Image (spheres, helix red, strand yellow):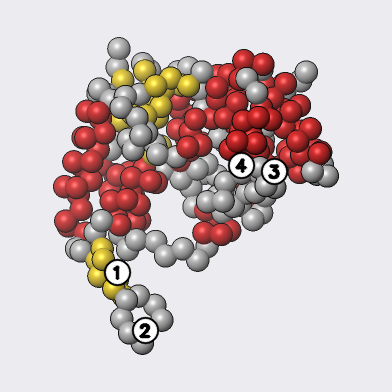
Amino acid sequence: MSVTVLLDADIVAYQLAATAQRTYKWPGLEQPAVAADDFATLPARIDAEVNSITRAVGADKLIVCLSCPTSENWRLGVLPTYKANRAATVRPVHLQAVKDYLESEYPSYRRPTLEADDVMGILSTHPRLVKGKKIIVSEDKDMKTVPGWLYNPRKDLKPWRVSEDEADWWHMYQTLVGDATDGYTGLPRCGPVKATQVLGDAEDGPGALWERVLSAYEAKGLTEEHALVQARVARICRATDYDFKTKKAIEWDPPQT
């Protein structure tokens, strides 16, 4: 059976580009100075990283997964402030060049309105788009909300399988705790311990999990609509969350109970 890596190229590109520059703070200057290596030094590092990841999970194929431009992200239609906190972030000098190299040198997948997370989620859960075993390789904790094989190079010794029950549980967990990096709040003052207490067992099913999440929001004086916005932006697209005819994400709706 063939094994295909679904690579979170947004993270890999950022990390690689960051290794090719140094930042210096000089007295009297408000902004630090950045000295970047010539891009010619990067392709060998990029190829070495890709080969290392492929070997680590025993894969024979790889698909580079990339995000659409931030301004096109479908989640902005649900929560206009989504990732607005990143607007002032200074990105590595060669970030776009590294992404362009990955996209041109390896099989790649990028679609309008979708983040790399969504691309990985759709490819991983679609029964026919990618044949054989598929392994998402990402350091992003959000990918635990997608059923299928997952490997975090920073934490995992080997790929592990996320069940559908576990993925649904993690989706509701993210709905409660939010994600400061992505700019959505979740349930105010709800940390990991509280979220785990609210949710209980994953085996209870998505309907029961949503009812518990909704009760927790209502206990804080928040509406179902508020909870639904958080759940929708927290949802990483699976194949069933994407309309292949219109090429648009399908916003998540609570399961019928």
Residue assigned mark 3: 187
Q: Give the image quarter of residue 34.
A: bottom left
Q: Mark 4 points at which residue?
A: 191
Q: Is residue 108 visible?
A: no
Q: Residues within 10 Å of mark 4 (few under 14, many from 20)?
A: some
Query: Counting other residues with Cα less than 10 Å from the Cα at mark 1, is it few (<14), some (14-19), or many (20 or more)?
Result: few
Query: Residue at label 1?
Result: 23
Q: How many labels does the image show?
A: 4
The quadrant of the picture occupied by the N terminus is top left
Point out the frontmost of discs 1 and 3: 3
- Give the distance between the C-alpha atoms of the residues marked 1 and 4, in whole angstroms: 34 Å
Q: Please state if 208 lies on the left or on the right of 66 as rendered.
A: right
Mark 2 and mark 4: Cα distance apart in space: 39 Å
Decide which of 124, 139 is in the foreground and name it.
Answer: 139
Per the image, label 1 sits on a secondary structure element best described as strand
Badge 3 element: loop
Residue at mark 3 to residue at mark 4: CA–CA distance: 9 Å
How packed mark 3 is, by other alpha carbons closer than 10 Å (few <14, some 14-19, many 20 or more), is many
Q: Mark 1 or mark 3, which has the lower sequence index? A: 1
Q: Alpha-carbon distance for marks 1 and 3?
A: 37 Å
Return the x and y of residue 39 as percentages of the image width and height: 21, 59
Which residue type does callout 3 highlight?
Leu
Of labels 1 and 4, the one closer to you: 4
